[in-house]
Image (cartoon, rainbow, N blue to C red):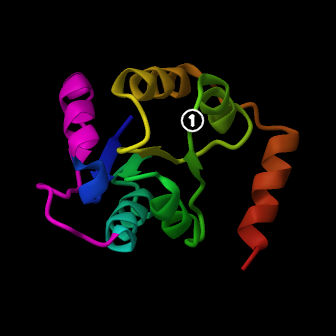
């Protein structure tokens, strides 16, 4: 599985910790590469391009709270960005929603929790069935 990771300045520190923690997964780092202010819609757009071009199968996005960057990513067709804040949500984001981007708050979440949520998501399996019908409906929405 190809995983890309990206953050704005509010998520830079968490991104760096995750990048090092998951070094064995060979994450593709889409930036930002320092704490200088950047606009989260621009970061989200880079991730969307990676998912759509299939350079990445899964994305991890981080901003200060996770809210802004998840809104930006979810404006794009084909993107299912899940703002994950506990293990159950991490599991269901995969099992029911087949999320292709996980979103976290760099200023609002603990590193150990985020690692637990990512691990939970990676171990979960998409159920399909009635959930696929719902995802198909999402694709027809404007």
Q: Is residue 90 left or right of residue 34?
A: right
How far across and down, in percent of the image, does residue 141 sit? 76, 74
**Quarter of the figure with the C terminus:** bottom right
In the rendered image, residue 82, in percent from the top left (x then y), is placed at 58, 47
Give me the residue at 39% from left, 72% from top. Answer: 41
**Residue at left offset 38%, top offset 67%:** 49
Please provide the residue range marked out in magenta.
13-39
Q: Is residue 98 visible?
A: yes
Q: Is residue 15 above or below residue 20?
A: below
Q: How many marks?
A: 1
Image location of residue 96, percent across then percent down: 74, 37
Picture quadrant of residue 94: top right
Work out which quarter of the rendered image holds the N terminus and state it: top left
Is residue 121 depicted above or below 56 in this figure?
Answer: above
Residue occupied by mark 1: 85
Measured from the top left, where is residue 9 in percent x and y? 24, 58
The image shows residue 52, relative to residue 96, as above or below, that is: below
Residue 26 magenta: yes
């Amino acid at each position: 599985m190809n995983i890309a990771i990206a953050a704005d300045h509010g998520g830079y520190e968490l991104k760096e910790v995750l990048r090092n923690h998951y070094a064995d997964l060979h994450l593709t780092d889409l930036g930002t590469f320092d704490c200088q202010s950047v606009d989260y819609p621009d970061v989200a757009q880079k991730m969307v391009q990676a998912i759509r071009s299939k350079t990445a199968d899964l994305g991890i996005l981080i901003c200060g709270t996770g809210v802004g960057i998840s809104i930006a990513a979810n404006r794009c067709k084909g993107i299912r960005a899940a703002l994950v804040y506990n293990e159950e949500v991490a599991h269901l984001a995969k099992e029911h929603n087949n999320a292709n981007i996980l979103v976290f708050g760099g200023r609002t979440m603990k590193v150990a929790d985020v690692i637990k949520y990512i691990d939970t998501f990676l171990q979960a399996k998409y159920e399909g069935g009635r959930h696929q019908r719902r995802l198909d409906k999402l694709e027809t929405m404007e």
